[in-house]
Image (cartoon, rainbow, N blue to C red):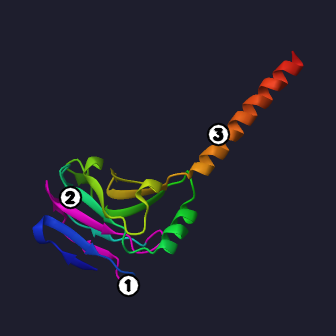
Amino acid sequence: MNLNTAGGAIEAEANTADPNLTITNGLTMANDSRYNVKLFGTGTADISRVNVTGATTTITTGADVRLDLSGLSVADVAVLRTDIGEFNTRTYTVLAATGSISGGGFNAANFSVSDFGNFNHTQWNFGVQTSGSNVVLTFQPVPEPATVLAVGAAGLGLAGWVRRKRRVSA
């Protein structure tokens, strides 16, 4: 993994050969610092990741995470959507600390996607959160309209069947 810290950003240029970066003696990310994360494949570990060992990791709520999705082809996006499945969520750990994370962690309001690449932004929900000593990204496909209509029609059919069953037994 290549690391560029210019301008207060950790830019992790991940690749399949070396997607991880290990930082010893802790990490401090102040307000206006940025962690650029890159998804480069469809596997559960195909994302850049920073592993912090040693001292406490401090991430203030003014630090932000930017996600780059430009590394996936149209076919990769389709595979990812199928692998995750509608109504499900995939979680990626993008920062893991051996100690605690202090300073409030990343604020969800400071999360953005810098390059959607072949992702249709209306068909996916993305999020970031600090969970214990990890920072995780979540991916969730938005159900297609046909799926929502099918679930709604099934619910209406079930409600009609229950109503009819009650009338017959009364």
Q: Is residue 43 visible?
A: no
The residue wearing badge 2 is: 56
Q: Residue 32 location, x and y as percent?
A: 14, 56
* Closer to us: 10 or 98: 10
Q: Is residue 129 above or below residue 8?
A: above
For this orientation, the residue located farthest to the left is: 7
Highlighted range, magenta: 18-45
- Residue displayed at 25% across by 54% down: 101
- Residue displayed at 20% across by 58% down: 56
Quarter placement of the N terminus: bottom left
The residue wearing badge 1 is: 17
In this rendering, the label closer to the viewer, 2 or 1: 1
Q: Amino acid at mark 3?
A: Gly
Residue 8: image quadrant is: bottom left
Q: Residue 141 location, x and y as percent?
A: 50, 56
Q: Amino acid at mark 2?
A: Thr
